[in-house]
Amino acid sequence: MADAPHSRLEAWLRYCEELGLGPFYRDRTRPALPSTPAPASAQTRQPDPGPRPASIPAPVAAAPSLFDVVESVPEDSLERIRADLGDCTRCRLHRSRTKIVFGTGNPRAELVFVGEGPGHDEDQQGEPFVGRAGQLLTQMIEAMGLRRSDVYICNVVKCRPPENRTPERDEIATCAPFLQRQLAVIRPRVIVCLGAVAAQTLLGFHASISRIRGQWYDYRGARLLATYHPAYLLRNPSAKVEVWSDLKQVMAALGLKPPPPRPRQRR
Ligand code: URA
């Protein structure tokens, strides 16, 4: 027999709690879910197709999305998210990590950078973007007239994938709710996704970074722009031109002016 919607919701909430999300409270400002699904004919104006064959499950009222659930966690904070993450063993990445890399910077930042996952240096130090790619990111931030402490920097996965491989789907799915909560707490005006993994995770679709970079998307009311990952720039310095053009769009969106050029040093 098919599960009733409420027992599926219960299972979903249990799963979320295992991920460290919760406890949950009903948000009474949201309309209640309909107890019976709206008839398809009311939505599409098509004639009633008659009884449904047994093999096709009846539609159920849409379960709340993870974000509906996340948004209804009252008084969430970065400290609480970090505490919920704990000494995480939810996915296989914990086995080879040294330190969890949660995120760093201004908890009220207007601008958040989201990378893929910690590398060797970040794993050692417990801080995002402190290796070579991180130094380049710091230069990019400073070229925008900002300091690292003005922005917030974090990653999709909080533990280093072995050999710096790309995080796998299930690892991303396990860790992404923590990123979503971080973004829900910080409420930045602009999110810059560094590379395809961050962009695909937050946008929820697959596309190559070269196709989606430099364009604005909406992420839960924030403006989201994807650009090349600084590690890619280390291998392909000519792509810095495109990244700078992307960052200039971010500066315009935030009303930032580039700092005056530094005087050249005499040799
Ligand atoms: N690359 C990332 O995606 N994140 C880091 O923190 C460091 C390198």
Image (cartoon, rainbow, N blue to C red):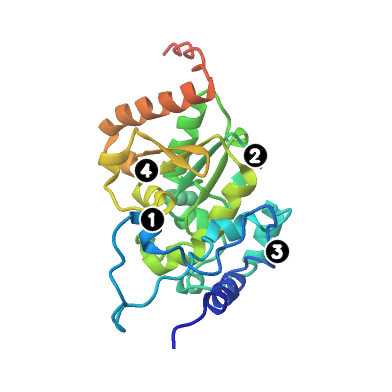
The residue wearing badge 2 is 106
- Cα–Cα span, label 2 and label 1: 45 Å
- Cα–Cα span, label 4 and label 1: 43 Å
Residue drawn at 55 percent across, 77 percent down: 11
Q: Position of residue 255 (x, y in %)?
A: 53, 20
- Cα–Cα span, label 4 and label 2: 21 Å
User: Split into 4 quadrants, where in the image is the N terminus?
Assistant: bottom left
Asked if the residue at tag 1 contacts the one at tag 4, i.e. Cβ–Cβ closer than 8 Å, the answer is no
Front label number (3 vs 2): 3
When the figure is inspected, residue 1 is found, relative to residue 27, above or below; the finding is: below
Ligand 1 contact, mark 4 (Cβ < 8 Å): yes
Residue drawn at 62 percent across, 70 percent down: 87
User: Split into 4 quadrants, where in the image is the C terminus?
Assistant: top left
Q: Nearer the viewer, residue 63 or 252?
A: 63
First reached walking from the N terminus: tag 4 or tag 2: 2
Asked if the residue at tag 1 contacts the one at tag 2, i.e. Cβ–Cβ closer than 8 Å, the answer is no
The residue wearing badge 3 is 25
Q: Secondary structure at mark 2?
A: loop
- Please say whether residue 158 is visible from this viewpoint: no
Residue 164 occupies which quadrant of the picture? bottom left
First reached walking from the N terminus: tag 4 or tag 1: 1
The residue wearing badge 4 is 229
The residue wearing badge 1 is 43
Residue drawn at 58 percent across, 30 percent down: 147
The three-letter code of the residue at mark 4 reads His
- Cα–Cα span, label 4 and label 3: 38 Å
First reached walking from the N terminus: tag 3 or tag 2: 3
Q: Residues within 10 Å of mark 2 (few under 14, many from 20)?
A: some
The three-letter code of the residue at mark 2 reads Asn
Q: Secondary structure at mark 4?
A: loop
Q: Secondary structure at mark 3?
A: loop
